[in-house]
Image: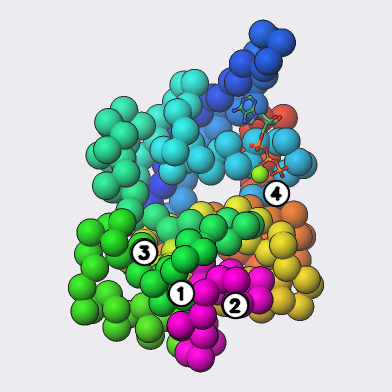
Amino acid sequence: MSREILKISSLKKNFASPNGSEIEVLRGIDLSINEGESASLRGESGAGKTTFLNIAACLENPTSGEIYWDGARVDNLPNRAQARLRAGYMGFVFQAYCLVPELNALENVLFAARIAKNFNRAAVARAKEILERVGLKDRMAHLPSQMSGGERQRVAIARAILNSPKVIFADEPTGNLDENTGLEVMEMLLGLCSQERAALLLITHNPDFARRAGRRLVLKSGKIFEE
Ligand SMILES: Nc1ncnc2c1ncn2[C@@H]1O[C@H](COP(=O)(O)OP(=O)(O)OP(=O)(O)O)[C@@H](O)[C@H]1O
Ligand SMILES: [Mg+2]
């Protein structure tokens, strides 16, 4: 039987709107992602995709429901315990890259090792090796401001994969890139996840990218549907 990397059960999320009314963003979501599986998630702006991802990563609390990582319930753990688990278990790629401006490419990738408290020579070697694999051998000493958008996003992907996470969350990773660069970055992300057997949950507005994932999910009216 495949290992369940991520399981979401009966998830609901309401937000209090500034005028005092409640917004029901997620209205009962059940979803399991298995080891090495890739899934894309589409849905209109405001549908709740980012909210869903944040809750699945325990970066935000659900109104109700349960979150399991690797079969163990985590939504009821203290934040510190969640953070410790998250650092080794999950990688993140955001639309806005979110690199540290003062750190060069290599140091940005190694930041993931520092967070997971496993900064050592093996981590440095692996960071260099991953940067080579994403085509940035000659950019390791560049600051984010000295790199193109596509290069920055490849650094972010290298950072996300450094700790050999079981799942990568990518929230519109090509949203700031032109079509060709977006395609390159997407191929890199899909390729690395499959080489490393990391599951991928990919939020994208691009139907072509969405189709490349093993499973295609749509978030609509607060529920997730499989296409
Ligand atoms: N902290 C908050 N307080 C109140 N409402 C919120 C909060 N965060 C998000 N929302 C609302 O929840 C809904 C879902 O937001 P979310 O960011 O998850 O959408 P999304 O699907 O990621 O959209 P996009 O494609 O534009 O990124 C939106 O209507 C938003 O206004
Ligand atoms: Mg979003």
Which is more foreground, mark 3 or mark 2? 2
Pointer 4 local density, CA inside 10 Å: few below 14, some 14–19, many at least 20: many
Residue 4 higher or lower than 187, as above or below: above
Distance between mark 3 and mark 2 Cα atoms: 18 Å
Query: What residue is drawn where x is 31% and y is 40%?
Result: 82
| Along the viewing direction, whichever of 175 and 48 lies nearer the viewer | 175
Say which quadrant the N terminus sits in.
Answer: bottom left
Dots 1, 4 in contact, CB < 8 A: no
Could you tell me if residue 205 is visible in this image? yes
Query: What residue is drawn where x is 72% and y is 62%?
Result: 176
Q: Which mark is residue 42?
A: 4
Q: Is residue 175 left or right of residue 189?
A: right
**Most common SS among magenta residues:** helix
Q: Which mark is residue 146?
A: 2
Which residue has dot 3 on it?
111
Upstream in the sequence, badge 3 or badge 1? 1
Distance between mark 4 and mark 3 Cα atoms: 30 Å
What's the residue type where badge 4 is placed?
Answer: Arg
Which residue has dot 1 on it?
104
Q: Is residue 143 left or right of residue 67?
A: right
Q: Where does the magenta region start and end?
A: 133-156
Pointer 1 local density, CA inside 10 Å: few below 14, some 14–19, many at least 20: many
Could you tell me if residue 200 is visible in this image? no
Which is more foreground, mark 4 or mark 3? 3
Query: For numbered disc 3, what is the local secondary structure?
Result: helix
Looking at this rendering, what residue extends furthest in the front direction?
A: 102
What's the residue type where badge 2 is placed?
Answer: Gln
Quarter residue 7 falls in: top left
Residue 136 higher or lower than 99, as above or below: below
Query: For numbered disc 4, what is the local secondary structure?
Result: strand
